[in-house]
Amino acid sequence: GGAGMGLRHSGSAAGDEPGTRPSRMSVSMQVAKWKAIVHHRKQQGARGLLINPEHSQFLQMWDCVTLVCLTFVAFVAPVQVSMLEAKFDLLFGINSAIDIIFLFDLILQFFLMYPKKTDYGYALEQDHRKIIRHYLKQWFIVDFLSIIPFDLIALLSNSKEMRGMKAVKVIRLMRLLKLV
């Protein structure tokens, strides 16, 4: 859209002929139209960043990606936590990639509309501040704790004790709560 979008005359009203001054009615109608466009764009400014889960094709694909990651975590993480020590290998690389995916998912959750109960049933929350507050109260702690790269911290700190700490690694399994 351009700066003058929606403000052009159709040329059909009296006084709107080329070389004549537009009538007072058409100017006031144009101003009202312009105000409506500005108001709509202001409303869409905050909402434009939000993701409607009912209509987002990206979110459908993203859910498939996170489901694959959660499935990997469900099968590999228990074995890794119970039997394997942290080291730089293929499994470390895959886990790092999954951490990045879950970090992106954590950020995405701050923009994802959620269903809220209304007097007429359910509606999607469109107030960005309420969406943020809702996520912080619900899943943020679990999501945040589950993406802390304890293996990387252990490897970089060269701590033999940290590499073997099973209790700390169990936090990674908290991701599986999302499957419930």
Image (cartoon, rainbow, N blue to C red):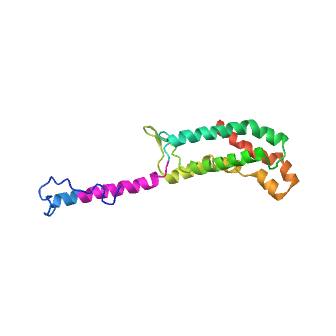
Residue located farthest toward the left when viewing the structure as drawn: 14
**Range drawn in magenta:** 30-50
Instruction: Name the residue located 71 percent from the left edge and 49 percent from the top edge.
Output: 96
Q: Nearer the viewer, residue 35 or 163?
A: 163
Q: Quadrant of residue 72?
A: top right
- Vertical position of residue 82 compared to residue 130: above or below: above
Q: Residue furthest right?
A: 160
In the image, taking residue 156 as reference, residue 29 lies left or right, namely: left
Query: Residue at left 33%, top 60%?
Result: 3
**Direction from residue 68 to residue 159 in the image, left or right:** right
Of the 4 image quadrants, the one containing the N terminus is bottom left
Q: Residue 92 in the image: x percent, y percent?
A: 76, 47
Q: Is residue 129 magenta?
A: no
The percent position of residue 49, horizontal first and vertical second, equals 48, 52
Horizontal side of 174 relative to 63 (left or right) equals right
**Quarter of the image containing the C terminus?**
top right
User: Where's residue 75, x and y in %?
Assistant: 74, 35
**Residue 46 painted magenta:** yes
